[in-house]
Image (cartoon, rainbow, N blue to C red):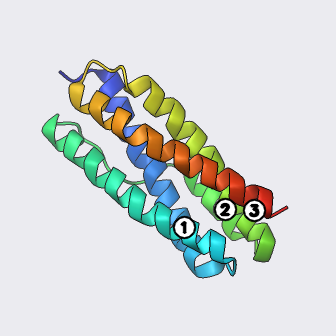
Amino acid sequence: MVDESAVSFVKQGLEVSQTEINASKMAQTTSKNARVINFAQMMIADHAGVNDDLQKIAIANKIAASDSIGAAHQAAITSMANNSGVKFDQAYIQLMINGHQEAIKIFNVAKSDRNEDVQRFARKTLPVLMMHLDSANAIAASLK
């Protein structure tokens, strides 16, 4: 059973996750901070898995979805890219904090969706997203 909330969840989840992957790839090559680079590598690996799972849900439920990102998320990445050194790291980590806060809200709603695939995936992924947010907050505190 696919309703508008399931469609919205899959599309928003893919966009937020892809934004984090794109920003993390940039951080991986731009940052000089080992903690930031390691975090970026974890984001790329974990969110590639999230995207794969969301694509499978999209296919199984005949939801037309892509992993492209919208103008607002692209603007955030562009803004981050205009920095260097510690300012870049701070901008990247703040983008990760904001993205994970957004994702956690989306996933909290989705864990009670009528679609069982969406429910199961949201419940499975939510603890990982919360761990990512905790890690990003810890790195942010160390960058001040």
Compared to residue 70, the image places residue 20 above or below, namely below
Label 2 residue SS? helix
Categorize mark 2 by other alpha carbons within 10 Å: few (<14), some (14-19), many (20+): many
Categorize mark 1 by other alpha carbons within 10 Å: few (<14), some (14-19), many (20+): many
Q: Residue 76, image x and y in percent?
A: 64, 55
Categorize mark 3 by other alpha carbons within 10 Å: few (<14), some (14-19), many (20+): many
Q: Which mark is residue 124?
A: none
Label 1 residue SS? helix
Q: Residue at x 54, y 67 (%)?
A: 40
Q: Which residue is mark 2?
A: 92
Name the kind of residue labelled 3 in the image.
Answer: Gln
Compared to residue 56, the image places residue 92 above or below, namely below
* Of the two numbered discs 2 and 1 in the rendering, the one whose residue sits closer to the viewer: 1
Front residue of this view, candidates 71 and 107:
107
Label 3 residue SS? helix
Front residue of this view, candidates 40 and 18:
40
Name the kind of residue labelled 1 in the image.
Answer: Ala
Q: CA distance from mark 3 to mark 2?
A: 5 Å
Give the quarter of the figure containing the C terminus.
Answer: bottom right
Compared to residue 27, the image places residue 131 above or below, namely above
The answer to the question of whether label 3 and label 2 lie on touching residues, with beta carbons closer than 8 A, is: yes
Q: Residue 70, image x and y in percent?
A: 50, 49
Q: Which residue is mark 1?
A: 40
In the figure, residue 114 lies in which quadrant?
top left
Q: Which residue is mark 3?
A: 90
Q: Is residue 95 visible?
A: no
**Mark found first going from the N terminus, 2 or 1:** 1
**Mark found first going from the N terminus, 3 or 1:** 1
In the figure, residue 139 lies in which quadrant?
bottom right
Q: Residue 2, image x and y in percent?
A: 22, 24
Q: Is residue 37 visible?
A: yes
Front residue of this view, candidates 134 and 64:
134
